[in-house]
Image (tube, rainbow, N blue to C red):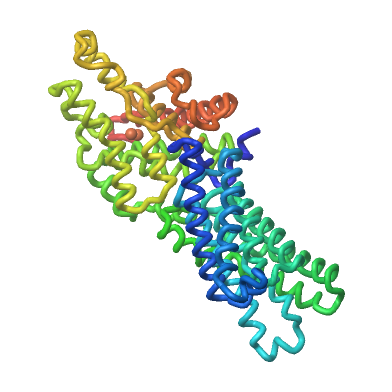
Amino acid sequence: MSGSKSATRGSSRPPDNGASPRGRYWRLLALSLGSAAVFAVLFYLWGRELFPRAAGRWGATFPFVGAVALTLAVALFLSEWFGFAGREIRKVRLAVRDFLFLCSLALLLFFAAKAVIDLLAEIPALGRGVPTRVYAYLIPLPAFAMVVRVLINSETSILFTVAASVLSAAAASGSWPALLFLLLSGTAGAARARRVPDRYRMLMAGVQTAPVCALAAAALEFSFHGGGGVLWAAIFGAVNGLLSGPIALAVMPVAESAFGYASDIRLMELSGTGHPLLSRLMVETPGTFHHSVVVGTLAEAGALAIGANPVLCRVAAFYHDIGKLGKAQYFSENQAGSANLHDTMSPGLSRTVILSHVKEGVRMAGEFRLGDRITEIIAQHHGTSLLYCFLDKAKPMIKDRKASEEMFRYPGPKPKTREAAIIMLADAAEAAVRSLDRPAPQEVDEAVTGIVNRVYLDGQLNECDLTLRDLHAVGRAISQVLAAIAHGRVDYPETGKGAIV
Ligand SMILES: [Fe+2]
Ligand SMILES: [Fe+2]
């Protein structure tokens, strides 16, 4: 089922719908040329001797000719490779940020490869017994492939592994064993970084990668060069795998900060109520805070039911309504015991206040650097759904053509990922059941089914990967948890001597 397949990094990436195919092509080509030029300059500075040799007689006279040729070659490679993937693989998107991130990572890897090979060869104690070629088994591609899988997704990590293997193999004089080892070790690292909610799991992913790297390095060394360096190859391969966890842990916070990603480890850090936004939500809007915690529980159950990312669902739900901060009294969950302010407001003004919480939430998510995944879910958690509560009140205005029904819709976008869709359903279901007085499990189930049907028929799930089977499973999971919560709200019987506690 699509459940386990799409759960690679928790959220599937939406396709890049923001530009026409021609616009995307030129943007990609410009990016490729720009990043390839940077590569070429650095190649030129680092390995000056490569270019005259590569460009033959012309290179000997004009060393930059080699750099220009390499720029074009790398640009073509990147354009074709990522262009094809961006068009044909739905979960690979051509966002500028992702592209720059991948190029930066590939560049860093090239430097790391060059440094490992050149510096280790300078150490006299190692130089005597170890063939120089064996140092290529220390190129830390598994760590970088793990970072790409954790921060973007599995499809992109495979693409990155192939592209970065080709580029990094240049640092090892383009030898076949090095290229094959890089391809294999990068894939092994990415494959073992499936769910990484904490540092321990990341370290363990590296430990599990180590035997594969050791075996691959020993086999490649033996098959291409005989028995001389097999032991060193195995040792270096194992060390590469073991170090991939710590290296990935060191690279990830920098990448998150520079490019606005949010790994599951970052999400776990954000889940504590010590975060200033959650603290404010708890103190200033306790109703919204309680609503967010319940939506988090429901969304987590929904995610577990279909193999989506439960950590992302729970933590994004905590933050989905932060845009209500500062205007808590306008939202029903904070109005217990007080007058409804919307009774004295025009439907148009009510609409403006309510709709603004999405835009304000996205702004606050950016200000507090919550990362791309939470920000996207905040923007998408109402999709383009209708403000049903004000629609009846606005009917006379709509009849007089002073307003249209479309004005009472959220601006969108619709949920693009399964996690965003689950939070939309959990959010709406929680609000619907909250309005019921001591509902029986049957009533909860009917209310949740009604919400799921309404959201589906309104087309809000048209742009995400949720299958009908997923939808049914999510609805059932939400219904079960909500029924358990509602069932827990029982009155303690009076005994005449005070309540039993
Ligand atoms: Fe909301
Ligand atoms: Fe909400």
At 66% from the left and 53% from the top, the residue drawn is 191
The residue lying toward the viewer, choosing from 472 and 346, is 346
Q: Residue at x 41, y 59 (%)?
A: 258
What is the residue that sits farthest to the bottom in this orientation?
124
In this rendering, the answer to whether 236 lies above or below 266 is below
Quarter of the image for residue 324 reads: top left
Q: Is residue 142 left or right of residue 373?
A: right
**Is residue 299 in sight in this rendering?**
no
- At horizontal 27% and vertical 22% (from top left) the residue drawn is 407
Query: In front here: 294 or 64?
Result: 64
Which quadrant is the C terminus positioned in?
top left
Q: Residue furthest top?
A: 399
446 is higher (above) or lower (below) than 163: above
Q: Is residue 449 left or right of residue 387?
A: right
Give coordinates of residue 455: x percent, y percent: 44, 22
Query: Residue 253 is drawn in which quadrant?
Result: bottom left
Q: Which of the pair 287/243 is nearer the observer?
A: 243
* Residue 355 placement (x, y as % from top left): 27, 31
Going by the picture, which residue comes out furthest to the left?
Answer: 344
What x and y, as percent, mark residue 123? 65, 88
For the residue pair 133 and 407, the one nearer the viewer reads as 133
Quick check: which quadrant has ligand 2?
A: top left
